[in-house]
Amino acid sequence: MLLTFQLLSDEELREARRLLEGAEWVDGRATAGTQAVQAKNNQQLAKGSEAARALQALLTRALERSPRFLAAALPRKVFPPQFNRYSGGTNFYGSHVDNAIRFAENGARVRTDLSCTVFFADPDSYDGGELVIHGSGTPQRVKLPAGQAVLYPGTSVHEVTPVTRGARVASFFWIESMVRDPEQRRLLLELDDALIALRTEHGESPSTIALTGTYHNLLRMWAET
């Protein structure tokens, strides 16, 4: 399942861009796994820098108040957001699969059930730079307006196409979900969406209360906390 949604407000996007001005960028291959390092050619914001920590806090707050993210990801753990830039001679990331387990600086381990990319650059400010997610059908190509995010399976083979003009700046991170099975997560999201639609159209009723109970009983059955 691939899901796009608005994450950052205009004010948050302006603050993120301010923090990125003059930030220190380093070789992105330093954080790649043994397979991915062969395909990776970009830059990343220096870990532990003041800008990186401030941006991590900004994104974390945005994720915690995003109903769409919480409903779709059902997050148990979120790997601290990281930040990358594609431009000039460091402008692509070939096809690869992310590591199944990521290790945070504090030693915490995060199973990468879901991957997320948040776009900071306006799509008309750069050429190329599409996130291409490969699956069983036609590859899905994603290039979103600034402030929007895409959530997709961590198991996916994916790539970022070469940036031939301007700079593509984004955040990327991984989520370990309380519900490990992607089909179960999809069904829960569909049920949650249906409940919201029913409440909007008909208000609270015995039927919506019963369906809400079904949702939570399924979540109780499938979730790991």
Image (spheres, rainbow, N blue to C red):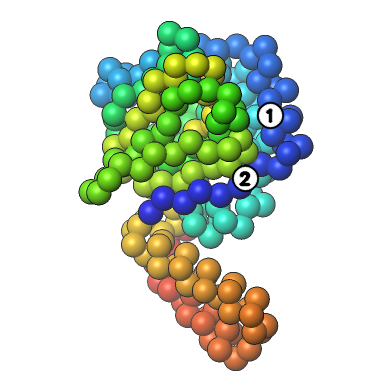
Q: Amino acid at mark 2?
A: Leu
Q: Residue at x 68, y 25 (%)?
A: 17
Residue 137 is marked as none
Q: Secondary structure at mark 2?
A: loop
User: Could you tell which of marks 2 and 1 lies nearer the N-terminus?
Assistant: 2
Return the x and y of residue 160 as percentages of the image width and height.
39, 28
Return the residue at label 2. 7
Return the x and y of residue 164 as percentages of the image width and height.
44, 16
- Where is residue 102, by image quadrant? top left
Say above or below: 200 vs 62: below
In the drawing, does residue 113 fall left or right of residue 97?
A: right
Return the x and y of residue 78 as percentages of the image width and height.
51, 43
Q: Residue furthest top?
A: 89
Locate the N terminus and report the quarter of the image it occupies.
bottom left
Circle 2 Cα neighbour tier, 10 Å, few/some/many (<14 / 14–19 / ≥20): many
Work out how far the residue at label 2 is from the one at label 1, CA to CA, in angstroms: 12 Å
Return the residue at label 1. 16
Q: Residue at x 39, y 20 (%)?
A: 162
Which sits in the foreground, 107 or 32? 32
Q: Residue furthest left?
A: 136
Q: Residue furthest right?
A: 11
Q: Secondary structure at mark 1?
A: helix
In the drawing, does residue 206 fall left or right of residue 177?
A: right
- Give yes or no for contact between labels 2 and 1 (Cβ–Cβ under 8 Å): no
Q: Amino acid at mark 1?
A: Ala
Q: Residue at x 53, y 38 (%)?
A: 144
Q: Residue at x 54, y 19 (%)?
A: 167
Circle 1 Cα neighbour tier, 10 Å, few/some/many (<14 / 14–19 / ≥20): many
Q: Can residue 110 be seen from the camera position used here?
A: no
Which sits in the foreground, 109 or 195? 195
